Amino acid sequence: MEAFALKKALDNVRATTPLVHNITNYVTVNDCANALLAIGASPIMSDEPADVEDIQTICDGLVLNIGTLNERTIAGMFAAGERAGALGHPIVLDPVGAGASALRTQTAGNLLDKLDMSVVRGNMSEVKALAGAAAATRGVDANPNDAVTEENLAESAAFVRVLAAKTNAIVAVTGAIDVVADAERAFAVRNGTPLMGRITGAGCMLSCLVAAFVAANPDAPLEATTAAVTAMGLAGQTAQKRMGGFDGNGSFRTYVLDALYRMDGEALEAGAQVEELA
Ligand SMILES: Nc1ncnc2c1ncn2[C@@H]1O[C@H](COP(=O)(O)OP(=O)(O)OP(=O)(O)O)[C@@H](O)[C@H]1O
Ligand SMILES: Cc1ncsc1CCO
Ligand SMILES: [Mg+2]
């Protein structure tokens, strides 16, 4: 991808401060709010069905994360999603744990079927489950057997593209190599570090960033999603460089937020490891 598109995508987030409505899990909710603030967006969390339509009306985008779903929040997700669709706001689905339980797999599938989803962002086990393929989700983490590797990259990208075409959404599968695609184009992003799998919420935070980037770049949702994925991976790399002798995953989590806060368009361009796939 043209480096300029990455810089512009981040600059547009900072210039417009998109307000992002999140219906998300209670494990990583504070990290999600801080990641949005760090990148220059603004968070609001609201999952009460009687509240979500008003909240979505004043927002620029919506994240639906099923990490700790329950009947009430599922109802909130549909109500918010319908309002977002009516207003033309981007919706990002994070199908946390799809494949690990029937309720998660079915709920993620129903949200995708019934709402006008802009982006689906998950790990490969979750996305495979969503596509109806055999998947062995290990709780909320990807099964290593599902990992995108240099060897299976072409095949993985073809799978992601087919799902994107079928759902009419951009699909971002993350892991050691991230694949971001719509029906026509696909990008591989090689930013990131394995340490990101040693904290909870790197994926949840990324899904929120995707909503902010797409809301701020409505004419280029694929580039915007790729920019968000690149920014998150680069923040992980920057955070890792800062790790000192006594630091562990607690500090790493903080350093990721700091790296997002300090990232500018030039740094994003310089650090990006993005390849457009044929
Ligand atoms: N082994 C790895 N090497 C490099 N980057 C990684 C690795 N694993 C994850 N990442 C990065 O971490 C971020 C989150 O991706 P991941 O696939 O772990 O999400 P997730 O499983 O949904 O996470 P969570 O559910 O904990 O929020 C992405 O930016 C991804 O590129
Ligand atoms: C650990 C965990 N369990 C449900 S949601 C969540 C956060 C990361 O997906
Ligand atoms: Mg996840």
Image: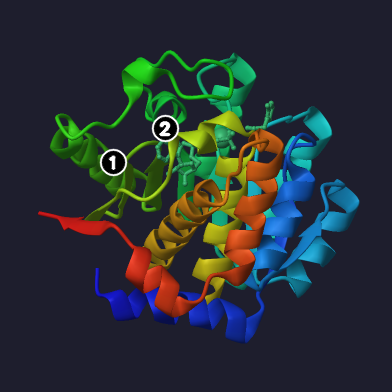
Image coords of residue 225 (percent x, y): 43, 61
Image coords of residue 273 (percent x, y): 29, 57
Identified at 32% across, 81% down, the residue is 4
Residue type indicated by callout 2: Val
Identified at 64% across, 46% down, the residue is 64
Asked whether the residues under the numbered discs 1 and 2 touch, taking CB atoms below 8 Å apart as contact, a structural biologist would say yes
Identified at 59% across, 66% down, the residue is 212
Image coords of residue 110 (percent x, y): 55, 35
> Which quadrant of the structure image shows residue 104?
top right
> Which quadrant of the structure image shows residue 177?
top left
Specify whether residue 133 is in view. Answer: no
Does residue 15 appear to the left or right of 174 in the view shown? right
- The residue that disc 1 covers is 160
Residue type indicated by callout 1: Val
Q: CA distance from mark 1 to mark 2?
A: 9 Å
Q: Is mark 1 within 8 Å of ligand 1?
A: no
Tell me if residue 155 comes above or below residue 129 in the rendering.
below
- The residue that disc 2 covers is 127
Of the numbered discs 1 and 2, the one sitting upstream in the chain is: 2
